[in-house]
């Protein structure tokens, strides 16, 4: 072959390799170790299949095929924290019925969806040749027949309720008669809907006393009080059930079952209901849609759970406390709250608050839709008195105990504008040596009663927010 022929042949080969059709690369590639049969099905079991099942509230996510087909929707809903429905922001409050995804779970779902949804076959690689066997099919699962609290002491069948087709979500009140001949003490309850396609939430209360005794959601279907506590059910009393039904495209009838669990003895504390009614704040027009309620606790109080009433346009709900020493803590901050999911917030560890603590609810609304009502209630389940520390759930305190020390010294200067005194004092046993130091004074009337040069005695109050003087007594005045 001549040199020119060789060049022509080589050129043709190069052009052929360029122009010849090439296999298209896959749009998605498996680049993750996350498997449906392992991580994903575990997330579905813990967060999803309470609603996403056959004959459930919405489309099923039980099989691999069902989940794979909706993997991009699942990914986006997880990133947006739209599903599963849980409005409380992490970091403020710890709740037993928290159904929100952890960041690790969100990462699993995103990685799985973006890596072509690998399935796995349910087998574990051991390095040994596997024997031929039938393929193991892994599915998400939940046992709706199991009673989470065990066999109830009393089962009550609710009256039949029908959800009208094409109606929006609606709430129906049902009266339940447990036929109690004597007072009983209720330590827990569990509810099972008759038709899971139509029931979103249920709230229970005692008709005769108005006491809220708990709420049901698909992901947390029971109420269980800490050991030693129980609700009093008076003889002849009735239980009210406010059932939130989902709008349905076809007729549906629900007849749920309520299981009651009784304590063998009376409650060690009287568990009662505290209601704060938020009202429009008197502030500038920029905050015209802010609603506030505050109460000062008249006794030591321990909060077990709370439930806000939702109104259209709600943007956020904050529940916070301020201790007598000034320490503050947010018990709940919820935002982007879905109206169709009225949700209780059950503290994993009951919150103990001291007498004199300010309990505050702050709500923000995007519009004046809430203006049609005079007040928007937030209901608390709580008891007064010293906190119970028995049982598996201990009581968390708002702040470390406040300490008091005795100070004696001479006032060097008074800073009324900033509420402070500079005092040259003797040793304060257990706190500090003799020195000259600036102290905060939180009561203006005490600050006004002293002048530079006065000798004083005072309490030094030390809390987690700092130290300050109170109970100031002038022993000698400057001439």
Image: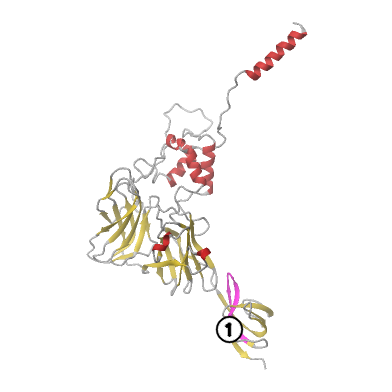
In this rendering, the answer to whether 140 lies above or below 429 is: above
Tell me: 442 left or right of 44: right
Identity of the residue furthest to the top in this view: 1
Q: Quadrant of residue 212?
A: bottom left
The quarter of the rendered structure image containing the C terminus is: bottom right
**Residue 333 at what x, y percent from top left?**
49, 59
**Residue 236 at what x, y percent from top left?**
23, 65
Q: Quadrant of residue 152?
A: bottom left
Name the residue tied to disc 1. Answer: 446
Total numbered labels: 1
> Which element carries disc 1, helix, strand or loop?
helix
The quarter of the rendered structure image containing the N terminus is: top right
Q: Is residue 160 visible?
A: yes
- Give the magenta range: 456-470
Identity of the residue furthest to the front in this view: 285
Identity of the residue furthest to the right in this view: 3
In this rendering, the answer to whether 384 lies above or below 157 is: below
What color scheme is it? Answer: secondary structure
Name the main secondary structure of what is drawn in magenta. strand
Q: Quadrant of residue 383?
A: bottom left
Q: Nearer the viewer, residue 172 or 231?
A: 172
Q: Residues within 10 Å of mark 1 (few under 14, many from 20)?
A: some
In reply to whether residue 474 is colored magenta, the answer given is no
Q: Is residue 471 visible?
A: no
């Amino acid at each position: 072959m001549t040199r020119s022929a060789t060049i022509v042949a080589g050129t043709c080969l190069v052009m052929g390799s360029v122009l010849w059709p090439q296999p298209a690369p896959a749009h998605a590639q498996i680049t993750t170790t996350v498997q449906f049969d392992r991580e994903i099905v575990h997330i579905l079991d813990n967060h999803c299949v309470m609603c996403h099942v056959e004959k459930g509230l919405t489309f099923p996510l039980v099989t691999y095929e069902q989940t794979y087909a909706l993997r991009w929707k699942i990914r986006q809903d997880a990133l947006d924290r739209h599903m599963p429905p849980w409005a409380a922001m992490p970091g403020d409050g710890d709740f037993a019925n928290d159904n929100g995804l952890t960041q690790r779970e969100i990462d699993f779902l995103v990685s799985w969806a973006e890596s072509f949804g690998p399935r796995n076959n349910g087998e574990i690689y051991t390095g040994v040749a596997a024997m031929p066997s039938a393929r193991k099919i892994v599915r998400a699962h939940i046992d709706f027949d199991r009673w989470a609290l065990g066999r109830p002491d009393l089962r009550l069948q609710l009256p039949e309720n029908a959800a009208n087709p094409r109606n929006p979500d609606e709430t129906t009140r049902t009266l339940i008669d447990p036929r109690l001949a004597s007072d009983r003490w209720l330590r827990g309850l569990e509810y099972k809907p008759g038709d899971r396609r139509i029931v979103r939430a249920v709230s229970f209360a005692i008709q005769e006393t108005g006491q809220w005794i708990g709420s049901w959601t698909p992901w947390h279907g029971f109420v269980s009080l800490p050991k030693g506590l129980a609700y009093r059910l008076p003889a002849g009393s009735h239980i009210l059930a406010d059932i939130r039904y989902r709008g349905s495209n076809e007729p549906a009838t629900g007849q749920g079952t309520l299981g009651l669990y009784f304590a063998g003895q009376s409650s060690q504390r009287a568990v009662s209901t505290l209601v704060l009614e938020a009202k429009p704040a008197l502030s500038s027009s920029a905050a015209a849609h802010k609603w506030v309620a505050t109460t000062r606790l008249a006794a030591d109080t321990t909060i077990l759970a709370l439930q806000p009433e939702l109104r259209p346009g709600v943007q956020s709900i904050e529940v916070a406390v301020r201790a007598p020493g000034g320490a503050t803590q947010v018990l709940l901050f919820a935002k982007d709250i879905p109206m169709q999911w009225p949700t209780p917030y059950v503290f994993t560890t009951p919150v103990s608050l001291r007498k004199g603590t300010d309990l505050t609810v702050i709500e923000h609304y995007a519009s004046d839709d809430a203006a049609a009502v005079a007040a928007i209630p937030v209901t608390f389940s709580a008891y007064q008195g010293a906190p119970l520390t028995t049982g598996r759930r201990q009581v968390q305190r708002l702040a470390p105990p406040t300490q008091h020390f005795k100070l004696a010294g001479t006032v060097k200067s008074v800073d009324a504008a900033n509420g402070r005194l500079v005092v040259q004092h003797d040793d304060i046993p257990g706190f500090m040596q003799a020195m000259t130091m600036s102290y905060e004074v939180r009561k203006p009337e005490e600050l006004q009663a002293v002048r530079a040069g006065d000798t004083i005695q005072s309490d030094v109050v030390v809390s987690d927010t700092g130290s300050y003087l109170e109970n100031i007594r002038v022993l000698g005045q400057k001439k």
